[in-house]
Image: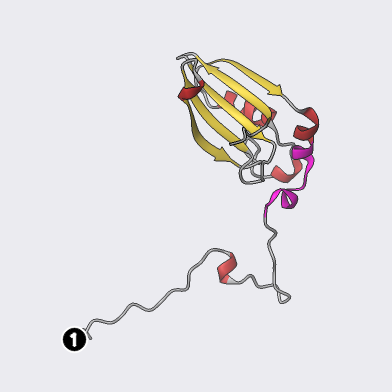
Amino acid sequence: MQKKSIVARMTIHHTNGKRTIVEVPEDATFSEFYHFYLQEGKRWSTKKQIRVANRNTGLLSLNAHLQTPGLEAVKAQALRWGREIESIKVRVIRKKAYRRLLTTAPDQLGMTKVRTQTDGRIPAFHMGFLPVMAAPEKAGVA
């Protein structure tokens, strides 16, 4: 098994001795851009993945498309968490690949485009709604 290559890493050291590690892999997609890990102790065997986040993590949702994504935005969000933080270190391992991932359009990173019909309606199955079926009527109830 080949080890995945990491483009950038941010390490947050907490006062209780734990670390939160945020990594950006080279083959990141829009919806799986940041990988969050929690590490207790010094050994890498204690590193556990806690979540995977999209590229807009750390950005304000109002104008996310106008803001610059990256570990600096996640760092600013981590400072707003309110937890006891000793230090935060951001390390960009491969600058050119990291810059390419940040400047690539979301649809090229795997984010799907929304299609509208020519008459302007959006079909219900695109919005995630399931058709409502009539409940079977009970026998003998009027």
Q: Quadrant of the N terminus?
A: top right
In the depicted view, which residue is nearer to us: 33 or 66?
33
Image location of residue 96, percent across then percent down? 81, 31
Image location of residue 15, percent across then percent down? 49, 13
- Judged left or right of residue 31, residue 43 is left
> Magenta span: helix, strand or loop, mainly?
helix
Q: Quadrant of the C terminus?
A: bottom left
Badge 1 amino acid: Gly
Which residues, given as a range, are shown in magenta? 100-111
Residue positioned most to the right? 96
Number of numbered discs on residues: 1
Q: Secondary structure at mark 1?
A: loop
- 69 drawn magenta: no
Name the residue at 70% across, 59% down.
Answer: 113
Which residue carries the number 1 mark? 140
Name the residue at 46% across, 16% down.
Answer: 41
What is the quadrant of residue 70 in the picture? top right
Image location of residue 37, percent across then percent down? 52, 29
Count neighbours of disc 1 (C-alpha within 10 A) and say few if under 14, some if 14 to 19, many if 20 or more.
few
Residue positioned most to the front? 1
In the depicted view, which residue is nearer to us: 10 or 142?
10
Image location of residue 52, percent across then percent down? 55, 39
Name the residue at 73% across, 45% down.
Answer: 65
Q: Check the image and report above or below for 65 versus 98.
A: below
